[in-house]
Amino acid sequence: MTLAFTHDVRAPRVVFGAGVLERIPEELDRLGAARVLIIRTPRRGDAVERVAAAVGARLAGVFDGARMHVPAEVADAALVEARRVDADLCIAVGGGSAIGVAKAVALRDGAPFVAVPTTYAGSEMTAIWGISEGGRKTTGRDPRVLARAVLYEPALTVSLPPAVTAASGMNALAHCVEALYAHDGTPVTALMAEEGIRALAAHLPGAVRDGADLDARTGALYGAWLAGASLGAVAMGLHHRICHALGGTFNLPHAETHAVVLPHVAAFNAPAAPEALRRAARALGADDAAGALFDLAARLGCPTSLRDIGLREDRLDAAAVLVTEVPYPNPRPFGPAGVRGILQGAWAGRRPAGHGAGSAPRE
Ligand code: NAD
């Protein structure tokens, strides 16, 4: 057996479980925070009120302008607000959009932040930031945007609507699947990813069926933590490249695009990463990971075709070229023909063929 790896992963402190919001004062003491700015998206719900109550007299302000993909003007406005209220710590309450704004503030000002996630997107566990300007999203990794603590309270996710639960959950699954074949993966990251798939596959159906089922919500959030930790630890592959290209250029919805594309990339990569896909299949309780991912997405009520989320078929050639413009790590080499095959299967919503036959022709 040959085994060689470098495991060098920095991850935030994590506090998980029912009642963690009561520990906010303790966390603020630990970080020496005296003036807190809460960052959120403008949605209804009691998550922010509960966090604000726990922050108490140290609450300096609430910025509720967070938006998807962190437009530069939103990042600027949040920074102005943080300075205006003289905040020494931000708390991002919400999904990837709120956490993304807190990261942008941390990047520009060095102000630390704590994350209280309410979706399964996983941004809270990564040092990846993204800011969009003039129709382009710039991303990067920077240790300054790593949360100082992440507080996971499953009860905050009960208000996530079924469709968001499903798509956000499939987005988390994609982090785990790609982590299993990442070129910089280690035995520990693979364990996290496999367990993340198991937890998400086991608990997402219950969370979609009954959003108030706290057992299912707890299991799904536990899986989402592992998925975020996997995303933060290793490089993602072709699946993420395709989703970012489609999302950025054709304005497709982020999480739903992940749900549609993932089974097709899993099928494409299976011949080149059989052990990774075997582990994914085991965690899904199936023989074939690609088919099981497709079935799970369908069972959760996610869209299963790019056609259904608004991509025109005559865009597929251009999309395939776009995807291959940038080199990306992936277990199976890919070019326009291979990606075109993946996109065709995903566009039509075909269930990918089993056992790694894939839906795409060989390059
Ligand atoms: P989001 O944060 O935009 O949330 C989706 C919608 O759900 C919003 O309208 C939000 O207000 C609402 N919402 C959130 N929590 C809710 C709850 N508990 N109940 C009811 N409604 C709720 O979406 P997201 O999928 O969490 O994040 C997507 C964004 O995050 C994208 O911009 C993506 O690029 C980014 N992202 C970044 C990373 C990273 O590591 N940097 C990782 C994953 C995602």
Image (spheres, helix red, strand yellow):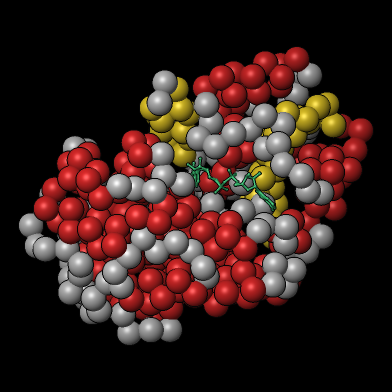
What residue is rendered at 76% in x and 44% in y? 44
What is the number of callouts on the image?
Answer: 0
Residue 268: x and y in percent read 21, 64
> Does residue 120 appear to the left or right of 250 in the view shown?
right
Where is the N terminus found, in terms of image quarters?
bottom left
Visible residue check, residue 75: yes
**Which of the 4 image quadrants contains residue 357?**
bottom left
What residue is rendered at 31% in x and 80% in y? 288
**Which of the 4 image quadrants contains residue 6?**
bottom left
What residue is rendered at 25% in x and 55% in y? 343
| Depth order, front residue of 117/141 | 117
> Does residue 41 appear to the left or right of 254 in the view shown?
right
Query: Which residue is farthest right?
Result: 57
Visible residue check, residue 333: no
Residue 183: x and y in percent read 27, 55
> Does residue 362 appear to the left or right of 4 in the view shown?
left
What residue is rendered at 59% in x and 24% in y? 74
| On screen, residue 203 above or below 68 | below
| Depth order, front residue of 169/27 | 169
Residue 325: x and y in percent read 19, 37
**Which of the 4 image quadrants contains residue 89?**
top right
Where is the C terminus found, in terms of image quarters?
bottom left
Residue 237: x and y in percent read 30, 52
| On screen, residue 214 above or below 251 | below
